Image (cartoon, rainbow, N blue to C red):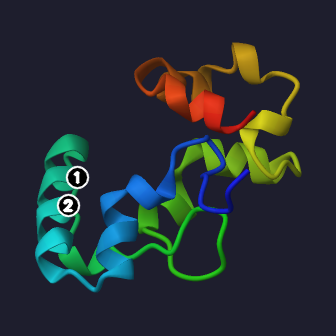
Amino acid sequence: MKQLIAICGLDCEKCDAYLATKNNDQALREKTAKLWAQLNNAPILPEHINCEGCRMDGAKTFFCSNLCQVRQCALGKGFTTCGDCPDKDTCPIVGVIWQYTPQAKDNLQ
């Protein structure tokens, strides 16, 4: 499995926060912050859009490092990814992601 596959299975290389960080793209940071602020009804600013990948050392968005229930659950149980969890197929937390992005589950196999 690629290192840039997130704990939930999403591909970090396709994430706008990762791409903005990797390419130091301020316009993408601003666009992503605006979209994420609207989607989450939260004050997300361009300076919050810095991430080097969910499972990588380095910068993470505030949501990913502090609020992501999937990440907190897996790390709390000592799993590298949700793919290691015996309850993954019935998990309501990661199940929401997999419902909308089935490829994420496939990425963990």
Residue at point 88%, 51% (across, down): 78
Quadrant in which the C terminus appears: top right
Image-based side of 72 in relation to 97, left or right = right
Q: In percent of the image, x 43 and y 68: which residue is there?
A: 61
Local crowd at mark 1 within 10 Å, few (<14), some, or many (≥20)? some
Quadrant location of residue 77?
top right
Reply above or below: 36 against 54.
above
Q: Amino acid at mark 2?
A: Thr
Q: Position of residue 45 (x, y in %)?
A: 20, 72
User: For this view, does 7 lie left or right of residue 33?
Assistant: right
Q: What's the CA distance linking mark 1 and mark 2? A: 6 Å
Other-residue count near label 2 (Cα within 10 Å), few / some / many at <14 / 14–19 / ≥20: many
> Which amino acid is tagged 1?
Trp
Q: Secondary structure at mark 1?
A: helix
Q: Is residue 12 left or right of residue 37?
A: right
Q: Position of residue 4 (x, y in %)?
A: 59, 61
Secondary structure under badge 2?
helix
> What residue is rendered at 60% in x and 52% in y?
6
| Residue furthest to the front | 1
Q: Quadrant of residue 48?
A: bottom left
Measuring from the top left, give residue 56's x and y in whole percent.
Answer: 65, 72
Image x and y of residue 96, in percent: 49, 23
The answer to whether the residue labelled 1 contacts the one labelled 2, judged by CB atoms less than 8 Å apart, is: yes
In the rendered structure, the answer to whether residue 55 lies left or right of residue 23 reads right
Q: Residue furthest top?
A: 90
Q: Nearer the viewer, residue 91 or 8?
A: 8
Residue placed under numbered mark 1 in the picture? 36
Disc sitting over residue 91 in the figure: none
Q: Nearer the viewer, mark 1 or mark 2?
A: 2
Of residues 13 and 66, the one drawn nearer to the viewer in this rendering: 13
**Residue 32, label in figure:** 2
Residue visible at 20% across and 75% down? 46
